Amino acid sequence: MIQHLPARRSRLLPACLLIGTLLGCSPKETEAPPANILWITLDTLRADHLGCYGYFRNTTPRIDAFAKESVLFEDCVVPMATTLPSHLSMLTSTWPIEHGVLANVTQGGKRFVRSTGLVSFAEVVSEAGYATAGFISAKPLQSWTGIDAGFQTYDGPEQKERIAQETVDKALAWLDQHQGQSSDQPFFLWVHLFDPHAPFQPPAEFKNAFQPQPELDTFLADRGIPDLVQGPNGLDVETRPSHDLYDAEILYTDSQVGRLFDRLDQGGLKEHTAVLLMSDHGEGLGQHGVARHGLIWNELVNSVFILRAPGLAPARFQAPVSSIDAFPTLLGLLDIPGARSFLAQSSGHDLFAPEFKERPQWSQSSARLISYGLPVLYSLRRGPWKFVWNTEESTGVLYNLTEDPFESTDVSEQNLLMKVELQAELLASKQIQEQRGQVFGSGGEDAMDPKTLQDLRDLGYTGND
Ligand SMILES: [Zn+2]
C-alpha cells in the first residue's frame, strides 16, 4: 500500500534544551511558545459522505478546502460507534475496555474516572499552561460523565441537544475573550457539533439542499441499502429522504465549521494553531439493515480524521489508523511539557514517527446492546481482513475488505487458517486491554439522574440499533 508521509515540522528544539540538564539552562528561556489546538468533533459523520473522502455530493466545501491544507487519514477506525466511549478513547488514547466506559447509558454507561495512570489529554495541556475549554452540543457528553476532566471551561446544552450555531457562537465568544485577555497563553479548544445525528431536521434554508439523483441510486445499490429500513422506534424509515436530509445536516454543519476556520484566519491565529477535525462514528442509514449506530460495520466505525498543523505538509495518509492515534500524533508535532506521561498510558501511536508500522485496528459494539439480549461484538482488522467475534455464541465471521468492501460475504470457510489466527490475536488483544483496564482502575459507577436518562432515551440511546 502506498503511503505519503508528510514532512514533519522542525521541532525547533535548541541545543541547550537537548542537554539542558548538563548546562543548567532553562528550556523556558529558549523554547518557542506551544501552538494552540482546536479540536473539532462532528458527531455521527460518516466518512464516505464527505467530498474529501470521495462522496459525490458537495456536502462539505469548507472541510474539503481545509483538507487540502492538511493530512487526511483516509482509513480511520473508531474503537466504538458510540458517542461517549468514542470521545473518551480519543481524549485518553486508550481502548474502551481500558478506560472502562462501554456505553452512553446502561450496561457500561459509567463515568470516566481519572487515575494516576489514566488522564485526559485536556488535563495534560491544562497542566502545561494551556487555557482549556470544551463546548459540546448533546447530553451524552455532559459533565456528569467525567469527560470534562481538564477543561477549565465546559459548556453544554440544558436540553437534549443544541444546534451547531449556538455551540459555535459560545466557542467563538470564549475565543474572543481569551484572545483579548491573554493572547500569549496557548489554548486547547474543543468544539463538538451534533447536527448529523438523528433526527435529521436541518435548518429551513438547508432542508432542500439535496434532491434525489441517479448517483444516489448507485451509491445505495453498491452498498445494498434497501428503500425501507426499520428505525429504533420500530417504524419504517425511507432511506432516500434520509440520505437527502442527513446530507443537508452535514452541509449546515460544514458552514458552522467554516465560521471556526474564518476566526482562525483573522489575527494570524491560523499560523499558530493545530486543527484536528474528527468524527466519533458514522451512521447506518439503512446499510446492513441498521438505521443508526453502535455496531461495528465499516460505515459505523470508519470516521473522519484530518489534521492541519503549523509546518505540516498536506498529504493523504492511506494506511489504516485508529482515532486513538490522534493525540499521540499531535504530541509528536508539538512541544508540550507532560506529553511523556500521556504517551505512557497511550495505546495509540504517533503516526508520523519513523518507526510507524501498520497495526491491526480494533472495534467493539456498544455494551448497551446487552440490555436487548444482543451479544457484544468485537472486530479486528488486519490487512484486507476483518474478523468479527461474537462473544455470546463464540463464533466468528471473516470478511475480505479488498474484494468485499461493504462486508456482504463471510469467507471463513475458504480461509480457515486466517480466521483462527485473527481469532487468537483478537482474544489476546482483549485480554491485554482488560489487564490494562484493571491497572487504570477505570469505569466509575453510573450516577445518572432520571432527567438525563430520559433525555438520552429521547435521543435514541436505548434502542437496539
Ligand atoms: Zn456520537
Image: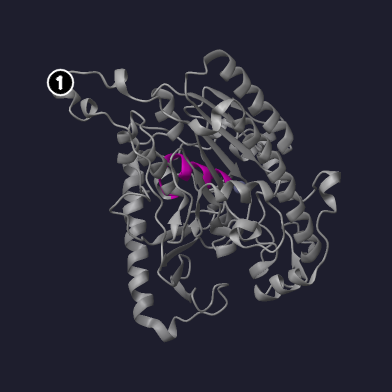
Q: For the residue labelled by badge 1, is the local secondary structure a helix, a strand or a loop?
A: helix
- The one nearer the camera, 102 or 153, is 153
Taking the spot 85% from the left edge, 54% from the top edge, the residue there is 208
Whole-percent x and y of residue 188? 50, 29
Rendered-image quadrant of the N terminus: bottom left
Q: Which residues are magenta?
A: 83-96
Give the colour scheme shown: one colour
Query: Which quarter of the picture shows residue 258?
Result: top right
Classify 10 Å Cα crowding around label 1: few (below 14), some (14-19), many (20 and above).
Answer: few
Residue that numbered label 1 is attached to: 23
Q: Is residue 126 above or below residue 326?
A: above
Asked if one can make out residue 108 in the rendered structure from this viewpoint, the answer is no
Whole-percent x and y of residue 7? 39, 48
- The one nearer the camera, 344 or 145, is 344
Rendered-image quadrant of the C terminus: bottom right
Chief secondary structure of the magenta portion: helix
Whole-percent x and y of residue 381? 43, 66
Query: Which quarter of the picture shows residue 289?
Result: bottom right
Q: Is residue 85 above or below residue 240?
A: above
Taking the spot 69% from the left edge, 34% from the top edge, the residue there is 451
Query: Which quarter of the picture shows residue 296?
Result: bottom right
Residue reaching furthest to the bottom: 414
Does the stretch in magenta take in 91? yes
Whole-percent x and y of residue 148? 52, 30
| Residue type at the position of mark 1 | Leu
Does the stretch in magenta take in 187? no
Taking the spot 43% from the left edge, 41% from the top edge, the residue there is 327
